[in-house]
Amino acid sequence: MKAAYFIKPFVFILFLLPALYYFYAVYLAFNGENILGPDPAQALSLATGEWSIRILVAALAITPLRYLLNMPKLWNYRRMIGLFGLFYVSLHLIVFLMFLLQWQWGDIGREIVERPYITVGFTAFILLLPLGLTSFKAAQRKMGRNWKKLHKLVYGINVLAILHIIWVVRSSYFDALLYGSLVFMCLGYRIMRNYIPAVRRFIILK
Ligand code: HEM
């Protein structure tokens, strides 16, 4: 049997593990045991936010890595990783609505309007939805060239996510700097590949 048959389920489980851990932590919290530290709601919000950006950046890095490392098979993981990005951002939003806003629906609109970091985070989430909904092969076939155009939104989404993180940060800018640099490099790669013929030739030759 080919190793590839095992790699995909393995990667799937790997990306699912953090969510399973936090589901378990919430289950324990509802049963009177806290493993999330002094402020469980904030810990959950930070953790789901961290996993969201890690996975979104991983999805963004697939294209440059595929060419630079000459690993065309990486492409097979792009959709799964992108959908995991949407999954973790959705969890992050649910944690915000459930534990920070306590389902006070009336407050959501106000939060989105009054807090710029929520405005940009929420915009990134809304923009991710059409990408998730059209990530399947049938949609890709039906949309043709428009599919590619739509999926370029992923760059804007990552930039909004970085803005969100910069705005949220209270103590250390390490995450903003780390993920910001990675997004910047992926964007830089894209721009160079598209607009500098010598770079384009070099990448294609590889
Ligand atoms: C692409 C979308 C998003 C990404 C990648 C993301 C990522 C993150 C990250 C990494 C943090 C932690 C920042 C730190 O290190 O201090 C964070 C914090 C936070 N995010 Fe998001 N976020 C996104 C969307 C949203 C949305 C849609 C909401 C709510 C409507 C939201 C609400 C929050 C809140 C309230 C915090 C602060 C948690 C606290 O300190 O108590 N985020 N986000």
Image (spheres, grey):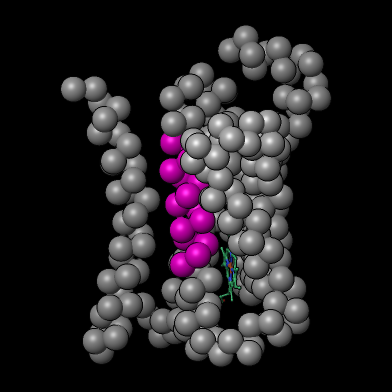
Magenta span of residues? 77-91
Q: Is residue 101 above or below residue 84?
A: below
At 44% from the left and 36% from the top, the residue drawn is 77
Q: Residue 83 lies in magenta, yes or no? A: yes
Within the displayed image, which quadrant is ligand 1 positioned in? bottom right
At 49% from the left and 74% from the top, the residue drawn is 94
Counting from the top left corner in percent of width and height, residue 72 is at 48, 22
99 relative position to 192: left or right: left
Q: Hey, which residue is sitting farthest left in the picture?
A: 1
Q: Is residue 33 visible?
A: yes
Name the quadrant of the N terminus.
top left
At 30% from the left and 49% from the top, the residue drawn is 13
Q: Is residue 58 visible?
A: no
Q: Which is more toward the observer, 185 or 11?
A: 11
Name the quadrant of the C terminus.
top right
Q: Which is more toward the observer, 138 or 120?
A: 138
Q: Is residue 192 above or below residue 51?
A: above
At 55% from the left and 40% from the top, the residue drawn is 139
Counting from the top left corner in percent of width and height, residue 81 is at 46, 45
Q: Which is more toward the observer, 83 or 32?
A: 83
Counting from the top left corner in percent of width and height, residue 21 is at 30, 65
Counting from the top left corner in percent of width and height, residue 26 is at 33, 77
Q: Which is more toward the observer, 176 or 82?
A: 82
Q: Is residue 61 above or below residue 18?
A: above
Magenta region, main secondary structure: helix
Q: Hey, which residue is sitting farthest front in the picture?
A: 142
